[in-house]
Image: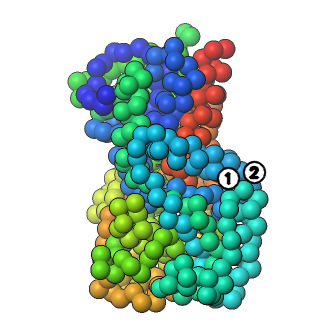
Amino acid sequence: MVGPPRLGLDADVVVVGAGIVGLATARALRRRAPELELLVLDKEPAAGRHQTGHNSGVLHSGIYYAPGSAKAQLCTAGKAALEAACAAWGVPVVRRGKVVVATEVGELGRLDELRRRAIANGVACYPLDRRGLAAVEPHVAGVAALAVPGTAVVDFGAVVEAMVGELAGDDVMVRTGVTVQALHPGDGHVEVRAAAAGGDTSVRARAVVTCGGLQSDRLLRAAGVPPPATIVPFRGEYVALARERAHLVRGLIYPVPDPRLPFLGVHATRDVHDHVHLGPNAVLASAREGYRWRDVDLDDLVDLARSPQLRGLARRWWRTGAGELGRSLSRRWFLASARHLLPELEAADLRRDGAGVRAQAVRPDGSMLDDFAIIDSPVGVHVLNAPSPAATASLAIGEVIARRTLERVRA
Ligand SMILES: Cc1cc2nc3c(=O)[nH]c(=O)nc-3n(C[C@H](O)[C@H](O)[C@H](O)COP(=O)(O)OP(=O)(O)OC[C@H]3O[C@@H](n4cnc5c(N)ncnc54)[C@H](O)[C@@H]3O)c2cc1C
């Protein structure tokens, strides 16, 4: 039921943000509390327009995350739940499997550590020697690898469509084109103030959940809570592999990660539609919702320039940042990095192919919030940090938020 807003509605719970986390939260609330009136609001003309609609389409297995962390627990639980839901919705999921490849002997220790972490997280995986790797991915150069057969791919756009359809069938309204600006606690209710095409509006609810992705810290501020971390946007650019060269990649191919920045390093993915892309990289974006180099948002830029977060990040990661920038600006530099894994690649095989922007919460000292972060306030429950693998984990994250919200609504 995505459509133009009908203003002035009241609801028991208002969910702000119709990305995959907001939709999954509404779904979990509906399943746990069929009697409640639920309303989902999003500022864009349709659901899933930001991170959810611009990602790699990977259902992550959960090998990277610190055992016991929310990421580790919710990724494995969420993946299983999403695979089951996709089967029920008729949304295709393909288990392509992934290899994490050591290209030199010096990386074997970290590969081993990754295997121990995967086992601690209950993820099935097995080691491959050079010959074993060649049997799985014949065009990859490596001395050894870790195979993770459960890693799958899906079209998250199709997942969003299925979720919105299911919610509509369950009488949950998804109103688009409504920008939430302020959340005020009232007497036994919360007033949600918003701007929409028809003018300003306000909705009264018993509790609010915010799942604002790239705007999550601002929504926390709108609720009167100073955010403990600020969102720093990192654009992740993709490079497509020419169709006639797509045979170079059978599944998902990743380098051994730096445990502090596991999302970095050139990697290759064969998506659910059989397109192969390389990336995404991570370059600082000059607009939170800026998908191209030329997209600049002055407010975002001023916020970023003033923030201690940026100075802290620059102090810690300037060398890594420079490398990412170099690979973004120079095709030759990117190709040289990609050839570590896929030596047969040629410049003519590659073309630019869109981008997404990651919302990464960063503390004032410049350290990144690694785990998912969900915060309570006087008006409700707020997602502050839901980076990758939050799309994979969405249904499990939704369950956590729904539980916390219902405790409040039923208190
Ligand atoms: C390049 C890239 C690759 C990724 N690859 C993967 C992957 O392969 N697998 C995986 O599991 N994860 C991946 N991720 C991470 C994943 O996409 C995100 O973690 C997930 O989509 C977060 O969902 P969300 O609902 O929190 O945020 P979003 O999808 O960003 O949704 C937030 C919503 O809030 C709305 N909103 C914001 N402010 C307001 C307001 N004031 N009023 C009303 N509405 C508002 C926005 O319009 C938006 O629709 C990737 C992310 C990126 C950027």
Q: Does 144 sit left or right of 398 as displayed?
A: right
Q: Secondary structure at mark 2?
A: loop
Residue labelled 2 has its Cβ within 8 Å of some atom of ligand 1: no
- Image position of 48 with respect to 93: above or below: above
- Looking at the image, do the residues carrying marks 1 and 2 touch, with CB atoms under 8 Å apart? yes
Taking the view exactly as shown, the residue that stands out farthest to the top is: 187
Residue type indicated by callout 1: Ala
Task: Say if residue 50 shows up in the picture.
Answer: no
The span from disc 1 to disc 2 (Cα, nearest Å) is: 6 Å
Q: Which residue is mark 1?
A: 72
**Toward the viewer: 16 or 115?**
115
The crowding category of the residue bearing disc 2, from other C-alpha atoms within 10 Å (few below 14, some 14 to 19, many at least 20), is few
The N terminus lies in which quarter of the figure? top left
x and y, in percent, of residue 70 in the image: 68, 47
Instruction: From the top left corner, tell me how far across and down residue 327 is, in percent.
Output: 43, 78
Name the residue at 36% across, 15% down: 9
* Residue type, label 2: Gly
Q: Alpha-carbon neighbours of circle 1 within 10 Å: few (<14), some, or many (≥20)?
A: many
Residue pictured at 40% horizontal, 31% vertical:
166
Residue shown at 61%/87% (left/top)?
131
The vertical placement of 288 against 245, above or below, is above
Residue wearing tag 2: 68
Between 359 and 169, which is closer to the camera in this rendering? 169
Measured as percent of width and height from the top left, residue 101 is found at: 60, 79
Instruction: Tell me where residue 320 appears, x and y as whole percent.
Output: 55, 75
Q: Residue furthest left?
A: 198
Is 250 left, or right, of 289 in this rendering? right
